[in-house]
Image (cartoon, grey):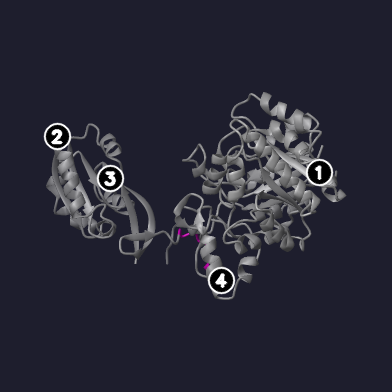
Amino acid sequence: MIRSITRQKSEEEIDRLLDGLGRVFILGCGTCVTLTRTGGDPEVKAMKERLSSQGRLVTGEAVLPVACDNLTGEALKEYGRQIDQADVLLIMTCAFGVQTIARQLKKMVVPALDTLFIGKESAIGQFDEICTQCGTCILGETGGICPVTSCHKGLVNGPCGGTNNGKCEIDPEKDCAWTLIYNRLKELDRLDSMRTLQKPRNHQGEPSPGKFKF
Amino acid sequence: MVSSFKEALESGKFVVTSEVAPPKGTDLEKMHHHIELLKDKVDGMNVTDHQSSVMRFPSLGGVLVVKEMGGEPILQMTCRDRNRLALQADLLFAASRGINNVLCLTGDSVILGDHKEAKGVFDLDSSQLLAAIRRLEKGKDLAGNDLDGSVSFCAGAIVTPEANPLEPQLIKFEKKIEAGAEFIQTQAVYDLDNFREFMDYARQFPVKILAGVILLTSAPMARFMNKNVAGVNVPQELIDEMTSAPKGRALDKGIEIAGRMIKKIRAEKMCDGVHIMAIGREELVPDIMSAAGLT
């Protein structure tokens, strides 16, 4: 399953965003941010404690089942009074949740998290970005590994000079996508696919912002 | 117009190129000094493009300075900071000002430099930039539109002969040649046995190869490169040799080693020449050349 991967903003940034706002309602989400431990019940409670210790009034808190769902509006009705009393909603969900909530309520929203990427859980507690929804899929030529996403520079013609023992020049924890692709294609006896000089990519497969209707 | 660098490459002589690094700022005095010192000694001078992703005076400006001073410039262009419109536009400008040599690079990540929050572009990669040059030469831009006035470049690229794993690097090397690279300046090589092996493979391609030589300035610098620079492998014997230098004489030892390597590469006709990188100590390039018996 794909998940929205988030990281909590620094306390300094959250404090700056809440400057002058004394009454806060906190929202978390029971889905992705619960799994990544960035906006589930324990994190919401810890945030409540921190804000209270700063002398702010926490008018209430809630962990919505799926913050990005259109039913979130209904779920929020239950907290109408507590939300009305708050100056601001501090939202510990991904940006999909923040925007869904912002559409439902006439209230200032402050995100407590940064949304990093849409990731796939590759091991327990580990998530990797494997698709950036570029709109021009080339997985058929790269052995099913996406260099647009998995190569830091999004290169489609093979590794750069920074590739280092199978790792990326920006972080020894990150794999060089082109080493992975090379190994895969070699295993499949399809290295010819890597030898084809690829044209410059179409960066406007779906000009942003994306929109889809059927 | 055929560049004198291209003539040198085709002449069969042992070609020597070096680098000049533009300043961080507008004070060009040091760069002028390096150009003055080198312009009559080397066959081409690469002007680096925000080397290591550190913002500097532009390479396009630097090559004009080299040209004005009577040197033969090689314009380094990375794909890190410009999209295909800007890269093509800069190539048109370069051609209009008599800049005839281009080295095409993908470029380091911005994260490694001094503007760590900048957007890395990489709209094209090094092989696609080479292909773009060949297309401009045919009078068309990358969108297929006709150009009014043409360009002609001696275009090159780089390769890392000590990359690990090596084969993906070699596949890319072949794609660069297919895309139109006429010359290759390699990442620094120190193990000449490995380099000889690389050349046994590379010689089959129609491309001139200049071996990269980086001046070792101290044993810690050599160890630093081994640890931090991808594809650079300074063998332990060379590090020991640097360590053995008397106090304060490490640089002389580095010059001696670089000179000895160049001499060997030339004597054995391993490749078509060398690209000497002194990384900020360009004033020492003439010393390296004389240690190599080139002057």
Residue found at the very far bottom of the displayed protein: A189
Which is nearer the N-term, disc 3 or disc 2? Answer: 2
- Mark 4 — residue? A185
Task: Tell me which amino acid carries mark 3.
Answer: Ala
Residue under pointer 3: A112
Residue B57 vs B162, above or below: the answer is above
- As measured in the structure, the alpha-carbon distance from the residue carrying label 2 to the one carrying label 1 is 72 Å
Amino acid on which the number 1 mark rests in the picture = Phe
Q: Position of residue B178 (x, y in %)?
A: 72, 61
Which residue has dot 1 on it? Answer: B5
On what subunit does the disc labeled 3 rest? A
In the rendered structure, which segment of residues is drawn in magenta?
Answer: A132-139
Q: CA distance from mark 3 to mark 1?
A: 58 Å
Element marked by disc 2: loop
Residue labelled with disc 2: A55
- Residue placed most toward the observer, B100 or B219: B219
Give whichever of discs 4 and 3 has the lower sequence position: 3
